[in-house]
Image: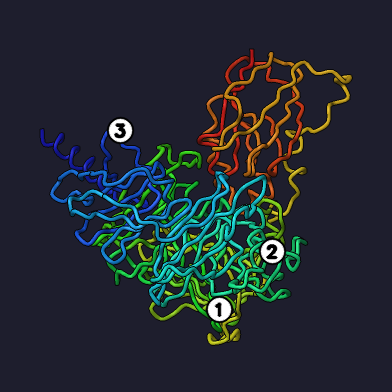
Amino acid sequence: MKLRNITFIILLIFSLSNAFSQALTEDDYYQIVTIPTPEGVELEVGGMVLMPDGSLAACTRRGEVWKVDNPYMFGGGKPVFTKIAEGLHEPLGLNYIDGKLWATQRGEVTILHDDNSDGQIDRFQQYYQWPLSGNYHQYSYGPEITKDGKKLFTLNLDWIGHGASQTKWRGWMFTLDDEGKMEPWATGLRSPAGFMVNDEGDIFYAENQGDWVGSGRVTHLEKGDFAGNPAGLKWADDPTSPVKLRTEDIPDTGQPLFEAAQKVEGIKAPAVWFPHTLMGISTSDMVQDLSGGKFGPFSGQYFVGDQGHSKIMRMSLEKVDGVYQGACYPFREGFMSGILRMEWGFDQSMFVGQTSRGWAATGRSEFGLQRLVWSGKTPFEIKSITSASDGFILEFTEEINEEKAYNPSSYDIQSFTYKYHHTYGSPIINQREVKIKGIELSEDRKTVHLAVDTMRLGYIFGITAEGITNDKDENLLHNVGYFTLNRINNTVAPLNLDFYAVAEETMEHDHASMDMPTDKLISEKRINEMPASWNGEVDETILIGTVPGLKFDTKLIQAKAGSRVKIVFQNNDDMLHNLLIVNPKTVEKVGQAALNMGLKGPNMGYVPEMEDVLYHTGILQPESSETIYFQAPKKKGDYHFVCTFPGHYTVMNGIFRVK
């Protein structure tokens, strides 16, 4: 009996020690709490705002406005949903101003009146109207409040195979004063669903990849700025326009946007790039943490939602010579649908409103309302990246191991940028390894100064600190940040390399495969010309296209075992896609491998090097096609075809049945 007890205690101790040794996850620090919606309620959130009584108001893409009481579910109670209005035209913005709800519909901003105070909206007052073309892409957003009390709005471009401004002021940001007078503010916007005014009164907006937009980005918009997409310049001749540029002034050469901005006055380079698929694929709302530490160690920083990847990213900013620049970092994944809106609660938790109908997302639900709550534990993170005159300064949330801090192999730095052109999106270009020349660790062991061999203005610096651990030998929760360098910060002195120099021979990194052309890596699985041995004949010709919403136009294709197959893949969508043929039951495995390729992904067409990938196309631009030839597997079964552009594989796949 005693031996049995001793054995039990030993097993218990082993079990507990094993549990404590397991790496902590995002959920240990920031918990996602789902707010259950009543059956039959399609809460596709388009806008959200906190009400003075602590309730949450949300408008939906279906034209309804809901009031949610007890959204915190205090005391284990359930939230109470009350529909207070309906019949609006896809409202994608909601605010509470002067005791009234303001909703931005497709064609107007509307004040909602509850005249008899019964909790139901009785009257809809049109405050300002703008024209519509009927194009499905004419989304409208706002209002936010500027530092001088004006209402701030943005209007999406139309989409006709490319961004277009079919009705006046599409692609613009503008303000309305208390008299309803409209004032254009800036243009060059494509899909400006997320924008905000920070604690200093400065305006920022988030942009999605598209035509003239190589990757997601956040830009500081001052009056008269042009942010990059020239479609809105159609209205720059208006006497009220503060923008001086005209369409013919915009270069379409593929040079980086920052370089174009140095040559053409009025073009505004982003404050922070969000590298496509490395961070997210469709930036949405932005909020600033002004909680004073009640939401964790990132007070003053920003959180940026991503609709396609159903996650929230983090952003830190600095201002050098009056110009914003900064870094973005991973933060929290795993939301139930595509994130469109975020709103702080009274307890400094974050409400997250979600929708994905027509805008496919990694979160499988069509809609969702969730709440993000800090557990009180401080995650071990790169707290911020700022610039120095000779490199970068990394601040951590905890003390770091000194030996690893001074080891240059603990870090990897790559610089890169994107093309600025009319084409949808851009590959990563001009990628270069950045070598570390010197390292200095602060006395409190929370800050590292990295002196580097190159500081390319306008470039993104991907800084990975994979080798860094804390005093408990724990790894960083997220070990990467992407810093956009717009100005050299000469207020931070360079390192004295007599004391902090890194020996050249210790700076060797193996990145040989990163610059290898795609066709050398995986050409045997991508054959674009019919093999000569086929004598000009194929057994099966299969046509596959795409439809909006991250979908192929078919879920099933078939071929005989061992047959000669020709697949013509036509990308009819307005997004980038590829097509892979993979082994049975490996869609998740291959898709996740593509997602984890990092900076290697664009160079390799997001096709991971693995045996489960049988055949594939390259990455196709919108309205383009590619033909591939291959012999069908000789073993019968249900194989799969899938798009592995990061985040797409979860919904964009089908069965390739070999008979």
Q: Which mark is residue 40?
A: 3
Which x, y percent locates residue 647? 53, 43
- Residue drawn at 56 percent across, 34 percent down: 652
Q: Which mark is residue 236?
A: none
Which x, y percent locates residue 136? 55, 44
Quarter that holds the N terminus: top left
Identified by mark 2, the residue type is Arg
Identified by mark 1, the residue type is Val
Q: Is residue 248 left or right of residue 74?
A: right
State which tag comes first along the sequence, 2 or 1.
Answer: 1
Mark 2 in CB contact with mark 1 (< 8 angstroms) = no
Which x, y percent locates residue 170? 57, 57
Say what secondary structure mark 3 lies in.
loop
Say what secondary structure mark 1 lies in.
strand
| Classed neighbour count for the residue bearing mark 1: other residues with Cα under 10 Å, few (<14), some (14–19), many (≥20) | few
Spatial CA span between label 2 and label 1 = 25 Å
Location of residue 434 by image quarter? bottom right
Which x, y percent locates residue 478? 45, 58
Q: Is residue 94 left or right of residue 329?
A: left
Spatial CA span between label 1 and label 3 = 49 Å
Residue picked out by circle 1:
323
Q: Is residue 630 left or right of residue 461?
A: right
Q: Relative to residue 358, is residue 249 depicted above or below?
A: below
Q: Relative to residue 116, is residue 653 depicted above or below?
A: above
Spatial CA span between label 3 and label 2 = 53 Å
Residue picked out by circle 2:
432
Location of residue 544 by image quarter? top right
